[in-house]
Image: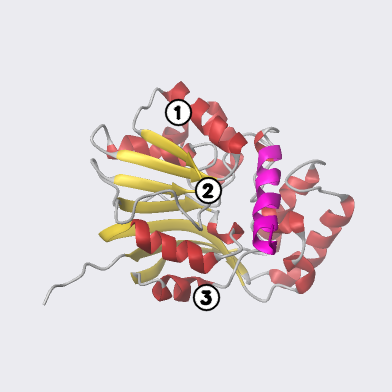
Amino acid sequence: MDDNDKKRNAVSQDYAKAVGSPGKGCCGAPVQKGVAAKLAGYSAVELGALPEEAVVNSFGCGNPLAFSGVKPGDVVLDLGSGAGIDLLIAAKKVGAKGSVIGVDMTDAMIAKAKQNIAAARVDNIDVRKGIIEDLPVESGSVDWVISNCVINLSPEKARVFAEIARVLRPGGAMLVSDIVADALPKELVENRALYSSCVAGAISERDYLAGLRDAGLTEVSVKERVVYDTAQLEAFAGSEVQELGGCGCGSASMDALIKEWAPRLQGHVASIKVFARKPVAHSG
């Protein structure tokens, strides 16, 4: 197992713990059930139509389907689909003639997603086990790629961007909610709990957009951006360590570390919604 596989394995273990302890979580999921989903931009109508377990186990940082052009009949792929909140919303948008694919590497998350899909009585969702750096999806088969606070967890982001370009149909698009950061100190970058909480593995917005362009995608742009202040950083990175056994061995020392660094990181960490499109090849 190389270093990249070790990081993926650690993240998978942490999220398996989190899904087994609703109310605690990764990526800033707060202790109160369902609050993360509300803060991430999901409407009360959207949440009210979903199984409670899908909402409780939402660990995202945004709503990647908000303001997207997903329409009936489309094929939507969710990278790191988790407990299925975005799968279920996408399934409603694409309708009976469309389909939704979820890819996740954590067995506990896949099991939870399938439970939630069954509870919602939805039959146009296919959840597959795999890593987002090597998607179990046919090339050129997807109209939309979505993802919610997951790509930052990948230790090989260039591979993820290349895979997005591969699976999209010409003219297809992605709309991804994620965390970006710059000027992160080594002390934080190497911290496992902060990696799983979507901070330490984040790259800069500049590098994120450049990576998408390098993969051959066009129209790359940031549709929304929320730059975190000190209080937001403490809440986002520290919520899971307020409860022992949260996403990656929280402790008083971890809480102190977050409080120490949050003021210094103000203005350097943001939640963004990123759009990109796969160009249509022109003949002649």
Q: Residues within 10 Å of mark 3 (few under 14, many from 20)?
A: few
- Horizontal relation, residue 156 to residue 266: left or right: left
- The residue drawn where x is 51% and y is 76% is 206
Instruction: Identify the image quadrant of residue 268.
Output: bottom right
**Residue type pointed to by label 3:** Asp
Q: Earlier in the sequence, mark 2 or mark 1?
A: 2
- The residue drawn where x is 26% and y is 68% is 279
Q: Residues within 10 Å of mark 1 (few under 14, many from 20)?
A: many
- Horizontal relation, residue 142 to residue 1: left or right: left
- The residue drawn where x is 65% and y is 36% is 19
Q: Which mark is residue 117?
A: 1
Q: Position of residue 200 (x, y in %)?
A: 68, 63
- The residue wearing badge 3 is 207
Q: Position of residue 226 (x, y in %)?
A: 53, 62
Per the model, the C-alpha gap separating discs 2 and 3 is: 23 Å
Helix, strand or loop status at disc 3: helix
Which residues are drawn in magenta?
Answer: 1-17
Residue extending furthest toward the right: 253
In front of the other: 86 or 257: 86
**Residue type pointed to by label 1:** Ile
Q: Earlier in the sequence, mark 3 or mark 1?
A: 1
Q: Position of residue 232 (x, y in %)?
A: 66, 57
- The residue wearing badge 2 is 40
Is the residue under label 1 in contact with that under label 3 (CB below 8 Å)? no
Per the model, the C-alpha gap separating discs 3 and 1 is: 35 Å
**Residue type pointed to by label 2:** Ala
